[in-house]
Amino acid sequence: MWNALDVPDSPAEPFTDYNRWRLLVNDGGRHTWHYLRTDEEVERWPQNEVDRFWLGLKTSMPDLPPAKDALDAARNGYKFYKHLQSHDGHWAGEYGGPMFILPGLVFGTYVTGMSFKLEERLEMARYIMNRAHPEDGGWGMHVEGHSTVFGTALNYAALRILGVDKDHPVCVRARAKLHQLGGATSIPAWGKFWLSILNCYDWAGNNPVPPELWLLPDWVPFHPHKWWIHVRTVYVPMSYLYGVKYKMEENDLILSLREELYTQNYYTIDWPAQRNNVHEVDMYAPHTALFDMINVVLSSYESCILPPLRRAGCDAAYRLIVMEDENTGYQTLAPISKMFNLIARAHVEGPESTAYKMHAIRRADFMWVGADGMMMTGTNGSQVWDTGFIAQALVETGLANEEENKESLIKALGWIDQAQIQHNPKHYKEAYRHRTKGAWGFSTTEQGYSVSDCTGEGLKAALYMQFNLDFTPKLISKQRLCDAVDMMLTLQNPDGGFASYELIRGPAWLEWLNPAEVFGNIMIEYNYPECTTSVITALAIFRKHFPDYRKDDIQRTIDGAIMFLHKAQTPEGGWVGSWGICFTYACQFALESLSLVGETYETSEYSRKACEFLLSHQREDGGWGESYKSCESSTWVEHENTQSVQTCWAVLALMYAKYPHPEPIEKAVKLVMSRQKPDGSWPQEAIEGVFNKTCAIAYPNFKFSFAIWMLGKAHYYLQDLKAKKLANAKLNGVNGNGKANGHHY
């Protein structure tokens, strides 16, 4: 089932017939790609516009008459984007970018005895080949990053397991780059762990990941349940797999990889000496002295573990693995934890178990085919996030009321309705989960994780569609809207800010124990300006419709959040974004929320300072462009090109702040309109998102939702500015040409 692949030297052209791929959307927004092998299947299931667009094939959407103005450009944009709406009302889309998650899919599948379809293997190999660095042949942390040991070693091993020969030109170049970097001995901690599971790195080369921590009392300050949820859900299966020292059985490929990945004989490597060996090209968060000291102690314990204690720790971790699987329909929180959970369940329960079979099925939810091949996505999608934004954009621009768009909005509301999570997790407190009743998540109800800003944007979309439009049904009851508010109010931290999934549970010094080396700010939850502002805006809009519901609580929450936002503003005037790139993203959210409490350019020093900060970075062509490296350094780093999406964020920010001068907005509108294609779409530019400071991730639907949003709002905004200017001119006795009315003096 893992036979050799005969693939071309160049991955430029698909390794499969792209006319045979189909995206199936069902079960509340689940996405799975299917390859049709017979002509009869192709005839029964014709390819649609959604398939063709995401595969990079030519769509059948016609060229449109050139836009007469910004609103017309927004209208043309939605004429195209509307055809990408799924039959159930949401927008599907790629959520790729990180280059360390597809190898995990390959490794987890391989070591547990599962398989892929031939077409999937071919396109996964092609994706990895296409994402090799064009200059040196390696791979980085993400698709736009420089080559690292982490990315290069994992993707090289994945290519070889998928069936690509070691003498293939892509493998030869990658191996040369890896050896230039000194080989895989200096791979970061997560890489060491994956290669140990693959039996290509000795467990002795890993710092300890003891499952016994799960036996500690919950009140212990460093108990894992106090860690950030993504680290926690990865640590659970990692601690189990480390505890049992799981590893793939040796075979010819494993033995060959042991030779290919290293610059010295595998069997002569001093493995304990590699525990803290991380190459400088990978290093972002060096170990602290405290962390290294703790590892010395834990390593001593590993030499004399107490078997009953180790078994108890592994049992506790395994119970949490099972609960996570059952809470999420075997999706888990994210792809890394999913594949680690799969390996653990396969190890304990075997290939005939329900868990094994469910994990095998749910892998497909993370496998996405794009123009460059098949990737693994960062979650099972971004369904709520993308649908919430375009719904708000259509309402705010007035496009929702146009007859040809009404059916689309009704479908979007229907999907937002079913996407609200109406129950707490099956395993709630015992799995250390925050409440979810009333929330919206990032993707689907089945995945079931609540997120503060996703709840905010989901609630805003629901309120907009149900109360601002006269043709939509009232699908979401007042009680359910109130449930969303109740949920958000549980998430405010003492300083007024909002984190992502839950309250901040652990002390700040836990960040000194960051083991990952390649990520920053991962050990605990943090308050984020963009999460905080999504909640502020949602609550502010909600109370317009329900002014008496928890009136004092909402006011107190908004007041605290605004205080946090004021304090979080940088001395230069911006806010550091943690989920999008970077200052333009966060400023858009911040200035919207400030405007809803009456703080604008004319009335608030915070708003004025933010506008001046943004305008200081506007380029000559009218646009804005910042690099993902802004997120790494928390300082503005220019991208070599201006970006349409970031330009839209900046202009939306200015309009929310009621910036009074039209010229910067007019220039930006002209730029975004100039980049629109004849069919109404926009080309894909640089990557839009980020997480944990260093890893960029794609939100390709942003180029539609935010361009439509900005252009439609700017049309009316600029009209209003012009009308005010004329009114002021008449009031002051000056005509529109700047000349005095009446007699000449």
Image (cartoon, helix red, strand yellow):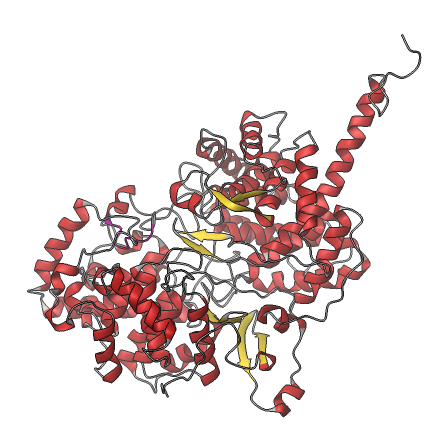
Q: Main secondary structure of the magenta part?
A: loop
Q: Residue furthest right?
A: 743
Instruction: Say whether residue 517 is magenta.
Output: yes
Judge whether 397 appears above or below 343 on screen: above
User: Where residue 74 appears, x then y in whole percent?
Assistant: 72, 52
Judge whether 605 appears above or below 428 on screen: above
Q: Quadrant of the C terminus?
A: top right
Q: Quadrant of residue 426?
A: bottom left
Instruction: Say whether residue 508 is magenta.
Output: no
Identify which residue, 685 or 45, lies in the foreground: 685
Q: Quadrant of residue 139?
A: bottom left
User: Where residue 461 appears, x then y in whole percent?
Assistant: 63, 53
User: Where residue 281 appears, x then y in whole percent?
Assistant: 30, 53
Give the residue at x 15% y 54%. Answer: 295
Direction from residue 171 to residue 480 in the image, left or right: right
Q: Quadrant of the N terminus?
A: bottom left
Is residue 550 shown to the viewer in this render? Answer: no
Identify which residue, 459 or 178, lies in the foreground: 178
Q: Which residues are magenta?
A: 513-519
Is residue 279 shown to the viewer in this render? Answer: yes
User: Where residue 103 appears, x then y in whole percent?
Assistant: 36, 70
Q: Quadrant of residue 138?
A: bottom left
Q: Residue furthest top?
A: 745
